[in-house]
Image: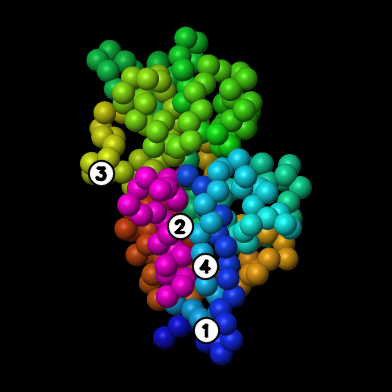
Amino acid sequence: MGLSCSATAKVPVYVAAYDYPPYFSAVLQTDLTRELITLLNEHQDSYVFRIQVIPPTNRHKALSTKGCCDVIFFESPLWGWKKSGVGFQETIPLVKGNERLVALKKTGRDQSFFDTFDGKTLGGVKGYHYLLGGELLASDEVEEKYTTYLADSRMTNLQMVLGGRIDLTIINDELLAALKGSNQINVGSLLLSEKVSLEYKLHLLVGDNKNISADTLQRLLRELGRQGEFEILFRRFNMERFQIYRPTTTR
């Protein structure tokens, strides 16, 4: 049985998605955004959710009044949204994640490798934000302060570290968990910093005056949780320890 029924046509809801694995990635076979959209479309009859792929540099514009999209999944309000001037609402946080520096594991290389960036090339992604030197910096600001190579994908950053083309990059623990046992990236060949660079909480963000509200989206998530779908989704990506919203226990 669906969550809601309607005799009228389904309202389209466009979901902005940029490369941010494991939440969205065209490189991976699947991701949390695509799987959550499938669940939302299967379990209710009022809305049809559709992915609109965008570059990360355009994510604020995408949710603006004249933007192409209505919502963005698994996003932190801290990542430039307050400064953007774009009006938005947010669901309660779904995930508590973190990032850390990673490098290629080599004989004799230890945690001291992460103490300084001098003489090293740092890999980043265009449009991302990073906490470095006590400051939350946009990717172009990182490029000004450090020797940086900006790619279009975090997976590219990892492949470049493993190939010795850059010295280190910043990766989220959620991606490392999802890649465990994967044949795409050998996580065991990475040296992980013991120090967390950034902690964050991820919500679903909804632009003001769009085709759906944050309250409605929250209700749909809660109903998925009551059917056990939400927990299954996170378990599939080996991400249970990052999940903080558990709809089955939320009133």
Q: Amino acid at mark 4?
A: Phe
Q: Amino acid at mark 3?
A: Ser
Q: Is residue 163 in view?
A: yes
Earlier in the chain: of badge 2 and badge 3, it is 2
- Quote the CA–CA distance across marks 4 and 3: 29 Å
**Could you say which quadrant of the image residue 47 lies in?**
bottom right
Residue range (magenta): 20-42
Above or below residue 113? Residue 160 is below
Residue 113 lies, in percent from the top left, at 40, 16
**Could you say which quadrant of the image residue 2 lies in?**
bottom left
Report which residue position mark 3 lands on.
Answer: 182
Quadrant of image for the N terminus: bottom left
Residue 82 lies, in percent from the top left, at 72, 45
Earlier in the chain: of badge 1 and badge 3, it is 1
Magenta stretch: includes residue 29? yes
Q: Secondary structure at mark 2?
A: helix
Between residue 113 and residue 118, name the one nearer to us. 118
Report which residue position mark 1 lands on.
Answer: 4
What residue sits 52% from the left and 52% below the top? Answer: 53
Report which residue position mark 2 lands on.
Answer: 33
Nearer to us: label 1 or label 4:
4
Q: Is residue 225 left or right of residue 107?
A: right
Report which residue position mark 4 lands on.
Answer: 49
Residue 75 lies, in percent from the top left, at 56, 50
Q: Amino acid at mark 2?
A: Thr
What residue sits 45% from the left and 14% below the top? Answer: 120
> Farthest residue in the bottom direction?
7
